[in-house]
C-alpha cells in the first residue's frame, strides 16, 4: 500500500498513472494485428473484425464482440463488403446514395443529438448524419482541390453545429453545412510542415494536431488560441493519437502510439514514454485512455488531484494526515492522536474526511478504497455535524462499481464515468448484456423505485425470455408469472407483443392474460386476429370507446351473421352496439333483435318506428308487427294495448274523414274529450264502451266537458242516468268552478254525509255546513266550519261552539 | 369567488383549481383570438368551473351555441368547439366546418371533448371529411365537479338509465364498502386500476378514511318521495340546475319608495344557491316547517344589527359600524330573497293538492293499502295531472309493495295509456326494466321488514329540532342514508339479513397503505367517509348526510359524490322514452 505511487509518473506539475484493468480473457492467435478494433467508451464492449480487407471474395471475416475484459459476447460472419471503419452505434442504414459511391473513410461520433456518422465518399465528398436515430443525410460542400481522401480529418461539435475539420496536407479547412473555409492554426511554427494527424478531445473542446515534422500543436477546437506546441522528435506518423484529460485536468496531455512506443505529451511540454511490447489500441475516455492489447488492458489517466494530495510522498494535506492517523490507530499507536490533533488544530477534519471519501471513489483497487473509507469513517467519529450522505453514497456506489468491474462482467467504469453516464444507463447496459440478477440486486441495493429499477430489468428479461425457442409456451408463461408477478410498471402486453413478433402467438395470448390493463390487451389481440378475446377484454376495461373500436373492427372484418353471434356472447358490447344503432342504424337494430329472438324489444322497436311514420297505413302495419311480437313475447298486456291503439287510430281516421274532427294523434281520453266538445256524445259513448274506460274517469270527463259547455240540462240528465261513480261532491265543485252556484246547489243534497260539510262549504253555505257538521257530531268538521266563519257570523259561531262543548 | 369549496374537511377547491388550470392550458394551446362554440348542455357545468372573465383573459372574444348551418361571423383566429362526444353533434360540427370553408377564411378549428375523447366521434368526423381541418383535438376530463364544500357531482344525467336500461355500465369507468351490482363493478374496476397505477403514484396521503359506494337501485324509494327540506323543495318545485335556480319574478320586484310597481319584471329571477351564502347554508337542510322560524330569527338579528347605529356615539364606533355595512346589507338582501322564496314555496305546500299528494306518499311509505288501486292516483289520472307525478306515485306504490298485483298493475297501465297516449308504453317498459315498476311475483312483501329493521319510518319526526335523519321527509328516513349511518355504527354485520333483501352484493375491501402514510389522527378529529351515489342523489339525502356529519357523537364526516343530483321528477324524466323525440 505504501507503493501506491509506484506507477505514478510525473508530468509537469501533475502525475500520470497507468494501471492494469484486466488480463484479457480472450485468446487471440494473431494478437491485434490486421484487425479493425472499435471499443465503446465508458468501459464499453470491444468489436473486432479480422482482416477487414478481404483476400478473396469467398472468405468471410468474422465480426467478434467482446466485453471490455475480453469475454466473448457475440460473433457472426461479416457478409457485406470491405469494412472501412468500425464504430459503435445502433442499427441503421444510410441509404442508396452512400451505397452507390464508394466509402473511403468513415468516422462515428457522439454529439448532444446522439450518435452521428460522417463519411468521405469516393468522389471526395463528405456526407454526414448527426443523429442516426433520426437519419438525415447532409452533403457537405466540396473541398477545393481535394482528390481522394484528405490526409486527416476530425468531426467537431461547436455551437450546436457539427463540422468537419480536415487537412489536405498543407491546407486546413473547416466544413460546415454551407461553406468550406480555409483556416490556420494560430501560432503554429511555419517550419511545422504539413499535418498528418489530428485528434479531438472527448468533450470536443480541444484539438491536437501533429505535423510531419513531429510537432504537436494543441489548442481549443475553435482554433482561436494555442495551448502549446511540442516537438516529439518523431518523424513517423503515429498509429493513434488520443487526448488524455479529465474534468478539471491540471495537466492535460495527448497520447501518441507507435508500434513499440507510447508517448504521453503534456501540454506543459513534458513527456512520458512507455515502451510497448504488443500491438495496442487506444480508447479515449472522458477521464483517461484505455490501452487494449492482446493480453491485457490498462487505464492511463492523470492522477486525480485529491489522490495526489493524499498519496504524494510527504504530503501534509489533511486527508493524508487522516489516513496516516488511522493507520497508526490500527497499530494502536498513540501517534494517531498526534496526527488527529494536527488536523484538528487547523480545523480541517471535515475537509480530511471529504478528501478520503472522494479519493476512495477514484481508486480502482478495493483495498485502497477500503483503507481510505475506514480512515474517513474514523475521522468522522470526531466530528459532530458531518453529514453522512457522501460517505454512504460513496460506499454504495463503490460496491456497485466493484461488482461491475469484475472480469466476468467487464465494465471498467471509473467513478467519474459512472457519475456521468448515470445509474439508469448502467442498469440498461447490464440488462442489454443480460446480467439480470446483478441488475436486480443492484436496483434493490440502491433502493431505486421499482418503477425505474427492478421492473425495467424484469421487463427486459421477459422480452428476452420469450425468444427462447427451446422452452415451451407453458414453461415460459409460468416462469414469467413467477418472476414478474405483479411488479408495477411491467407491461405484459409489451412482452406479449414481443412474443408475437417472434411468432409465438399462443404464448402471447397466455401472457396477455396477466396484463392488468385490459385496454392494453386489445390492440395486440386485434393484431393477432383474436377478435373475440379482444372484445371481451375491451368490455372488461370498461372503456366505451375501446369497445366501439373493437366492434367497428369486427363489423368490417366479419360477415353479418358471425358478427351478431360474436356480439351475442358479449352482452355489454351488444348493448353498446344497440345504443349505437338506436342513434345511427335503426335497421340494424331490428336485425339484432331478430337474431336474438328478443320479441319484446322488437315490438318496442316497431312501436318506436310507428311514430316516425307519417302515413297511417304503414303506421298500422308497423303496429300490427308490434302486436305479433308482443304476442310472441307472451306480453299479453302490451299486445292488447297496441291492438287498442290500432283500433283507436282507425276510429279517429274514420271520424276525421266523416266529420273533419282532427282527432289523429290524440290519446283516447283526449279523443273522447274532443268528441264531447264537438257534441258527438254518441261516438264518445261508443269509445267509452268499446275501450272499457273505467266509469270514474268517463264520468269526470263528461262532467267537466258539459260544465265547460254550460250544458246544464244535459248535465242534470247525465247525473241522473245512474248512481255517480265519482260521487256528487265532484258535481258541486265543477259547477262552482264554472261559477254556477245555482246548478251546484242541485247536487248538494245528493252528496254522501261524509262529504256534505265540504259540499256546503263549496257553495259558501255556512249554515248548511254547520248543520251537517253538528248533525255528524264531528269535531274536526266543526273546526273547519269555524275557520271559515268571519266575525259577522257571531250566531253561527256560538252555535258551533255549543255543539262541540255539548259533545264533551 | 369559490371560497365556499374550501371550508369543508377536505378542500375541494383544489379540484376546481386543477380543472381551471387544465382549461387555461388548453386555451393557451390555441394561440391568438378565439371564439368558443358551445354544446349547450355543457355551459352549466362549465359555469361552476370558470366564469367568462377567465375565458376572456385567454383571448376568448366570442361565444356561440352549437347549431347546424353556418357559423356566425367573428373576427377571430381560432374556433373551438366544446362538445360532448356524441355522433349527432359531430354532424353539426361537420356542417359548420363545411360552410366555413366556402368563405375562404383562414380560421383554425379545434375540438375539446368533454369529458372524454372518443374514437367513434373522430371516425365520424373523418367520414364527413373534416377531421383534417382540426388543429387540436383534445379531451377535457371534467369528471367530478365540485358543487359545494362537501358535494361533488359528475353531472352525468343518464348514468342510471344507462346502467339499468341499456345495460351499459361504462359510465362507471371513471370512478370501499359497497352495496349493489354497479358498486361491485366499480370496486372491481378500482382495484384493477390501482394495480395498474401502483408504484407510480401511491405516495399520496389519503384524505378519505372510507369510501362507500351505493347503487341507486338499492334505494329506489327515496328519490321518489317529495323532499321536504328547504333546498329539496326548491328543487322539487323550481328545479336547481348547476347550482342555479330560476324563480318567478313577481315576488322579487324591487319596490322603491314612491314608485308604483307597475312594470313587473318579466324575466325570471336567477339565483345562485350554495353555502357561500351564510343564510342559505343555515337553512338549506332544514325541514321547510322550520325555515319560517329561522328566517324570522335572522330578521330580528339583522334589524338589531342595524339598530346598533343609534348606539354608535364615538367616531370609532361609527367607523366600525360603517365597515360592517356591506356585510349587513348583503345579509339583508339574502334574507329578503329567501323570505320571498319561502313565501312562494309556502303557497304551494299549504295547497290541498300538495297535502293530498304527501298524504298518499306517506301512506305508501308506512304500508297502508299498497296492494289496492289507489283512488288518489286514479283521480289524478282522471284530472290529467302531469304524467310524471302519476308515474312517481305509481313507482312508489310498487316499490313499497314489492311489486304490484297484476290486476292493479294492468289497470294503472291502461289508465295511463288511454289518458296520456299509447306511446307511453315504451316508458312503462323502461320503468319495468329498471324495477321501478314491477309485477308482484311472490306473495311476500319484504318492504315492511326492511322498514322496521332499519327504522325507516319514525312516527314522531321532530321537524324543528331534529334528532333523526327522518326529518328530511317528515317521517321517512332515507334508506340510503340509514345504511350509511348503520355502517358507521354499529356496522353492517348487525343488519346482514336486511342487506340480503336488497338487490346486489355487498362487500368490503381494505386497501393496503404504504407504511408512513397512515394518518395520525388528532384527538377528537372525525373520520371522513366519501359516499358515492351511483345513479344520483337527492338534496334531501344530502341534507340527511350533513345532519349525520353534524351530530356530535357521530364521529364521522361525510363528503358526498354522485353521478347526478336528482329529484323524482328529473329522475323519472331521464327514464322516459318519447318516440317522437327520437326523430331528430
Image: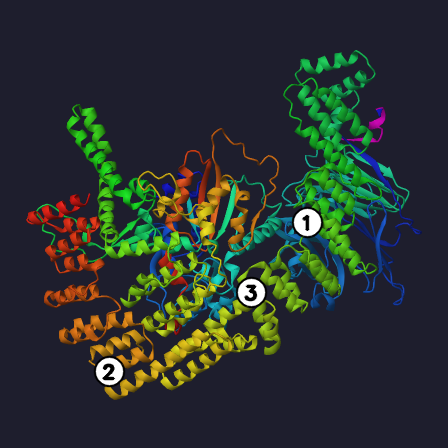
Sooner in the amino-acid sequence: mark 2 or mark 1: 1
Residue A45 pos. (x, y %)? 79, 49
Q: Residue A3 in magenta?
A: yes
Are marks 2 and 1 in one subunit? Answer: yes
* Bounds of the magenta segment: A2-13
Foreground label between 2 and 3: 2
Residue A751 pos. (x, y %)? 19, 63
Q: Residues within 10 Å of mark 2 (few under 14, many from 20)?
A: few
**SS at badge 1:** loop
Are marks 2 and 3 in one subunit? Answer: yes
Question: How many angstroms separate mark 1 from mark 3 (CA)?
Answer: 28 Å
Whether residue B98 is visible here, answered yes or no, is: yes
Pinpoint the chain carrying mark 1. A
Sooner in the amino-acid sequence: mark 2 or mark 3: 3
Q: Is residue A662 above or below residue B463?
A: below
Whether residue B238 is visible here, answered yes or no, is: no
- The front one of A217 and A618 is A618
Identify the residue at image location x=12%, y=65%.
Answer: A745
Question: How many angstroms separate mark 2 from mark 3 (CA)?
Answer: 53 Å
Identify the residue at image location x=34%, y=78%.
Answer: A691
Residue B447 pos. (x, y %)? 45, 54
Which residue is labeled 2 in the image?
A682
Which residue is labeled 1 in the image?
A486
Q: Is residue A317 above or below residue B551?
A: above
Residue A552 pos. (x, y %)? 56, 71
Foreground label between 1 and 3: 3
Which residue is labeled 3 in the image?
A572
**SS at badge 2:** helix
Q: Residue B492 in magenta?
A: no
* Residue A104 placement: quadrant: bottom right
Residue A429, which numbered label? none
Q: Residues within 10 Å of mark 1 (few under 14, many from 20)?
A: some
Amino acid at each position: 500500500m505504501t507503493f501506491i505511487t509506484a506507477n505514478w509518473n510525473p508530468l509537469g506539475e501533475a502525475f500520470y498513472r497507468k494501471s492494469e484493468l484486466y488480463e484479457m480473457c480472450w485468446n487471440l492467435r494473431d494478437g491485434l494485428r490486421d484487425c479493425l478494433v472499435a471499443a465503446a467508451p465508458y468501459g464499453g464492449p470491444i468489436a473486432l473484425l479480422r482482416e477487414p480487407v478481404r483476400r478473396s471474395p469467398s472468405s468471410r471475416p468474422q465480426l467478434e464482440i467482446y466485453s471490455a475484459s475480453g469475454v466473448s459476447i457475440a460473433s457472426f460472419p461479416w457478409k457485406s463488403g470491405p469494412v472501412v471503419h468500425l464504430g459503435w452505434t445502433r442499427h441503421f442504414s444510410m441509404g442508396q446514395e452512400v451505397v452507390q459511391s464508394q466509402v473511403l473513410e468513415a468516422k462515428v461520433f457522439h454529439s448532444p443529438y446522439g450518435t452521428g456518422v460522417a463519411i468521405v465518399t469516393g468522389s471526395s465528398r463528405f456526407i454526414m448524419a448527426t443523429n442516426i436515430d433520426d437519419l438525415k443525410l447532409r452533403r457537405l460542400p466540396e473541398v477545393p482541390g481535394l482528390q481522394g481522401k484528405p490526409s486527416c480529418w476530425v468531426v467537431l461539435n461547436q455551437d450546436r453545429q457539427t463540422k468537419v475539420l480536415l487537412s489536405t496536407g498543407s491546407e486546413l479547412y473547416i466544413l460546415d453545412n454551407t461553406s468550406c473555409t480555409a483556416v490556420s492554426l494560430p501560432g503554429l511554427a511555419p517550419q511545422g510542415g504539413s499535418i498528418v494527424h489530428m485528434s479531438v478531445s472527448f468533450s470536443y473542446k480541444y484539438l491536437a494536431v501533429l505535423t510531419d515534422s513531429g510537432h504537436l500543436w494543441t489548442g481549443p477546437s475553435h482554433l482561436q488560441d494555442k495551448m502549446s506546441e511540442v516537438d516529439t522528435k518523431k518523424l513517423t506518423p503515429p498509429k493513434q493519437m488520443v487526448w488524455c484529460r479529465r474534468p478539471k485536468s491540471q495537466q492535460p496531455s495527448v497520447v501518441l502510439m507507435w508500434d513499440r512506443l507510447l508517448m504521453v505529451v503534456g501540454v506543459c511540454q513534458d513527456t512520458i514514454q512507455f515502451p510497448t511490447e504488443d500491438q495496442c489500441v487506444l480508447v479515449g475516455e472522458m477521464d483517461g485512455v484505455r490501452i487494449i492489447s492482446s493480453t491485457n488492458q490498462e487505464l492511463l489517466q492523470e492522477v486525480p488531484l485529491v489522490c495526489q494530495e493524499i498519496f504524494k510522498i510527504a504530503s501534509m494535506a489533511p486527508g493524508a494526515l487522516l489516513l496516516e492517523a488511522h493507520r497508526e490507530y490500527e497499530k494502536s499507536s498513540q501517534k494517531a492522536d498526534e496526527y488527529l490533533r494536527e488536523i484538528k488544530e487547523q480545523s480541517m477534519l471535515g475537509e480530511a474526511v471529504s478528501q478520503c471519501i472522494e479519493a476512495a471513489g477514484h481508486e480502482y483497487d478495493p483495498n485502497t478504497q477500503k483503507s481510505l473509507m475506514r480512515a474517513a469513517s474514523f475521522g468522522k467519529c470526531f466530528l459532530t455535524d458531518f453529514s453522512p450522505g457522501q460517505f454512504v453514497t460513496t460506499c454504495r456506489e463503490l460496491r456497485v462499481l466493484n461488482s461491475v468491474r469484475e472480469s466476468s462482467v467487464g465494465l471498467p467504469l471509473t467513478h467519474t464515468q459512472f457519475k456521468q453516464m448515470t445509474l439508469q444507463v448502467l442498469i440498461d447496459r447490464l440488462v442489454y448484456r443480460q446480467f439480470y440478477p446483478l441488475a436486480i440486486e443492484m436496483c434493490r441495493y440502491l433502493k431505486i423505485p421499482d418503477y425505474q429499477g427492478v421492473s425495467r430489468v424484469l421487463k427486459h428479461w421477459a422480452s428476452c425470455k420469450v425468444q427462447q425457442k427451446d422452452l415451451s409456451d407453458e414453461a415460459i408463461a409460468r416462469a414469467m408469472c413467477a418472476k414478474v408477478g405483479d411488479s408495477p410498471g411491467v407491461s405484459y402486453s409489451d412482452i406479449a407483443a414481443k412474443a408475437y413478433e417472434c411468432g409465438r402467438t399462443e404464448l402471447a395470448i397466455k401472457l396477455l392474460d396477466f396484463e392488468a390493463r385490459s385496454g392494453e390487451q386489445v390492440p395486440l389481440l386485434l393484431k393477432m386476429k383474436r377478435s373475440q378475446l379482444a372484445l371481451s377484454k375491451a368490455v372488461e376495461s370498461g372503456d366505451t370507446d375501446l369497445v366501439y373500436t373493437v366492434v367497428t373492427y369486427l363489423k368490417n372484418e366479419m360477415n353479418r351473421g358471425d358478427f351478431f353471434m360474436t356480439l351475442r356472447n358479449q352482452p355489454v358490447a351488444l348493448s353498446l352496439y344497440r345504443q349505437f344503432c338506436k342513434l345511427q342504424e335503426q335497421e340494424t337494430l331490428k336485425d339484432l333483435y331478430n337474431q336474438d329472438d328478443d320479441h319484446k324489444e322488437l315490438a318496442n322497436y316497431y312501436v318506436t318506428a310507428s311514430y316516425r311514420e307519417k302515413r297511417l297505413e304503414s303506421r298500422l302495419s308497423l303496429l300490427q308487427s308490434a302486436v305479433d311480437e308482443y304476442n310472441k313475447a307472451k306480453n299479453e298486456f302490451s299486445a292488447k294495448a297496441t291492438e287498442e291503439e290500432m283500433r283507436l287510430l282507425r276510429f279517429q281516421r274514420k271520424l276525421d274523414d266523416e266529420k273533419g274532427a282532427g282527432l289523429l294523434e290524440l290519446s283516447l281520453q283526449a279523443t273522447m274529450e274532443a268528441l264531447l266538445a264537438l257534441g258527438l256524445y254518441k261516438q264518445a259513448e261508443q269509445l267509452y264502451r268499446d275501450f272499457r274506460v273505467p266509469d270514474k274517469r268517463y264520468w269526470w270527463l263528461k262532467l267537466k266537458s258539459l260544465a265547460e259547455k254550460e250544458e246544464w240540462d244535459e248535465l242534470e240528465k247525465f247525473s241522473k242516468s245512474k248512481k255517480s261513480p265519482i260521487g256528487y261532491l265532484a258535481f258541486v265543485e265543477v259547477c262552482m268552478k264554472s261559477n254556477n252556484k245555482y246548478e251546484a246547489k242541485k247536487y248538494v243534497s245528493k252528496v254522501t254525509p261524509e262529504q256534505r260539510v265540504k259540499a256546503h262549504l263549496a257553495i259558501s253555505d255556512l249554515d248548511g255546513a254547520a248543520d251537517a257538521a253538528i248533525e255528524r257530531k264531528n269535531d274536526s268538521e266543526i273546526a273547519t266550519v269555524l275557520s271559515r266563519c268571519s266575525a259577522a257570523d257571531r250566531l253561527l259561531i256560538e252555535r258551533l261552539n255549543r255543539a262541540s262543548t255539548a259533545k264533551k | 369567488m369559490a371560497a365556499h369549496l374550501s371550508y369543508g374537511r377536505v378542500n375541494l377547491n383544489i379540484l376546481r383549481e386543477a380543472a381551471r388550470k387544465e382549461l387555461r392550458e388548453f386555451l393557451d394551446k390555441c394561440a391568438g383570438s378565439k371564439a368558443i362554440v358551445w354544446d349547450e348542455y355543457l355551459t352549466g357545468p362549465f359555469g361552476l368551473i370558470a366564469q367568462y372573465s377567465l375565458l376572456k383573459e385567454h383571448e376568448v372574444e366570442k361565444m356561440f351555441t352549437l347549431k347546424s348551418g353556418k357559423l356566425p361571423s367573428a373576427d377571430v383566429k381560432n374556433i373551438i368547439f366544446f362538445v360532448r362526444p356524441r355522433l349527432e353533434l359531430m354532424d353539426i360540427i361537420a356542417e359548420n366546418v363545411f360552410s366555413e370553408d366556402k368563405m375562404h377564411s383562414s380560421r383554425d378549428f379545434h375540438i375539446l371533448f368533454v369529458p372524454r375523447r372518443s374514437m367513434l366521434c373522430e371516425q365520424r368526423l373523418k367520414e364527413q371529411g373534416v377531421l383534417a381541418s382540426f388543429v387540436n383535438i383534445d379531451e377535457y376530463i371534467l369528471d367530478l365537479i365540485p358543487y359545494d364544500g362537501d358535494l361533488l357531482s359528475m353531472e352525468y344525467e343518464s348514468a342510471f338509465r344507462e346502467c339499468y336500461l341499456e345495460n351499459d355500465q361504462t359510465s362507471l369507468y371513471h370512478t370501499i364498502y359497497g352495496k349493489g351490482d354497479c358498486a361491485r363493478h366499480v370496486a372491481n374496476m378500482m382495484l384493477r386500476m390501482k394495480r395498474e397505477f401502483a408504484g407510480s403514484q401511491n405516495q399520496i396521503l389519503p384524505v378519505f378514511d372510507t369510501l362507500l359506494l351505493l347503487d341507486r337501485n338499492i334505494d329506489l324509494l327515496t328519490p321518489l318521495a317529495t323532499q321536504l327540506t328547504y333546498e329539496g323543495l326548491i328543487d322539487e318545485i323550481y328545479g336547481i340546475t348547476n347550482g342555479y335556480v330560476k324563480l318567478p319574478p313577481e315576488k322579487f320586484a324591487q319596490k322603491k319608495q314612491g314608485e308604483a310597481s307597475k312594470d313587473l319584471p318579466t324575466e325570471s329571477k336567477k339565483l345562485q344557491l350554495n353555502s357561500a351564502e351564510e343564510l342559505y347554508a343555515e337553512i338549506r337542510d332544514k325541514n321547510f316547517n322550520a325555515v319560517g322560524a329561522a328566517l324570522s330569527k335572522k330578521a330580528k338579528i339583522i334589524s338589531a344589527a342595524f339598530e346598533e347605529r343609534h348606539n354608535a356615539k364615538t367616531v370609532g364606533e361609527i367607523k366600525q359600524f360603517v365597515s360592517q355595512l356591506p356585510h349587513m346589507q348583503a345579509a339583508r338582501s339574502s334574507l329578503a330573497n329567501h323570505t320571498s322564496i319561502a313565501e312562494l314555496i309556502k303557497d304551494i305546500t299549504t295547497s290541498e293538492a300538495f297535502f293530498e299528494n304527501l298524504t298518499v306518499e306517506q301512506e305508501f311509505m308506512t304500508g297502508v293499502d299498497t296492494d289496492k288501486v289507489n283512488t288518489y292516483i286514479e283521480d289524478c289520472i282522471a284530472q290529467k295531472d302531469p304524467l310524471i307525478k302519476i308515474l312517481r306515485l305509481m313507482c312508489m306504490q310498487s316499490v313499497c309493495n314489492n311489486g304490484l298485483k297484476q290486476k292493479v298493475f294492468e289497470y294503472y297501465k291502461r289508465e295511463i295509456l288511454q289518458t296520456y297516449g299509447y306511446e307511453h308504453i315504451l316508458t312503462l317498459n323502461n320503468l319495468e326494466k329498471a324495477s321501478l315498476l314491477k309485477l308482484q311475483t311472490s306473495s311476500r312483501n319484504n318492504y315492511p321488514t326492511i322498514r322496521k329493521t332499519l327504522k325507516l319510518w319514525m312516527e314522531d319526526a321532530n321537524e324543528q329540532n331534529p334528532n333523526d335523519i327522518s326529518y328530511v321527509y317528515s317521517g321517512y328516513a332515507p334508506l340510503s342514508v340509514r345504511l350509511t349511518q348503520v355502517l358507521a355504527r354499529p356496522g353492517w354485520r348487525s343488519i346482514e339479513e336486511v342487506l340480503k333483501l336488497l338487490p346486489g352484493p355487498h362487500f368490503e375491501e381494505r386497501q393496503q397503505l404504504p407504511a408512513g402514510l397512515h394518518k395520525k389522527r388528532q384527538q377528537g378529529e372525525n373520520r371522513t367517509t366519501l359516499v358515492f351515489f351511483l345513479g344520483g342523489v337527492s338534496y334531501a339525502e344530502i341534507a340527511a348526510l350533513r345532519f349525520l356529519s353534524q351530530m356530535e357523537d357521530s364521529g364521522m364526516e361525510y363528503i358526498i359524490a354522485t353521478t347526478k343530483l336528482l329529484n323524482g321528477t328529473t329522475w323519472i324524466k331521464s327514464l322516459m322514452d318519447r318516440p317522437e323525440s327520437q326523430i331528430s
